[in-house]
Amino acid sequence: MTPYRNQRAADLPARLSRSWLLTSAADTSLFAPALASEADSVIFDIEDAVPEEDKDTARANMIQAMQDGASAWVRVNDITSRTGRRTWPR
């Protein structure tokens, strides 16, 4: 995966974003095109875009992408949900 982000978009504060591109974190083939897009904000979705049985894989994919240098927001499940508690353990 190429962690390239449009520098203008990467530097733009979230409150000024005009376009948000949500991509399922369960499918890593979507990461590079999303990051190379002209969207002001890219969001790796590990919430509604991911079936329950794929959430652990999506979480691992997102973590690996971030460790590899990707610049994106992450949409997560409610912290009080079972899935959210697995994402944000205490």
Image (tube, helix red, strand yellow):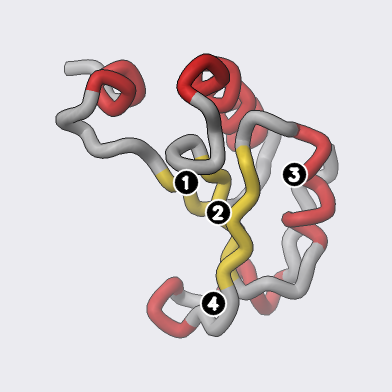
Residue at position x 50%, y 22% from top?
A: 55
Nearest the viewer among 3 and 82 is 82
Q: Which residue is mark 2?
A: 43
Expressed as whole percent of the image width and height from the top left, the position of residue 84 reads: 29, 27
Q: Are marks 1 and 2 in contact (CB under 8 Å)?
A: yes
Q: Residues within 10 Å of mark 3 (few under 14, many from 20)?
A: many
Kindly identify the amino acid type of the residue bearing the numbered disc 2: Ile
Kindly identify the amino acid type of the residue bearing the numbered disc 3: Phe
Task: Locate the C terminus and report the quarter of the image it occupies.
Answer: top left
* Separation (CA) of disc 1 from disc 2: 5 Å
Expressed as whole percent of the image width and height from the top left, the position of residue 86 reads: 31, 17
Number of residue marks: 4
Q: Which residue is mark 3?
A: 31
* Quarter location, residue 49: top right
Q: Are marks 3 and 4 in contact (CB under 8 Å)?
A: no
* Quarter location, residue 69: top right
Kindly identify the amino acid type of the residue bearing the numbered disc 1: Val
Q: Earlier in the sequence, mark 3 or mark 1?
A: 3
**Disc number for residue 40:** none
Instruction: Provide the secondary structure element on which disc 4 rests.
Output: loop
**Disc number for residue 74:** 1
Residue at position x 54%, y 84% from top?
A: 18
Q: Earlier in the sequence, mark 2 or mark 3?
A: 3
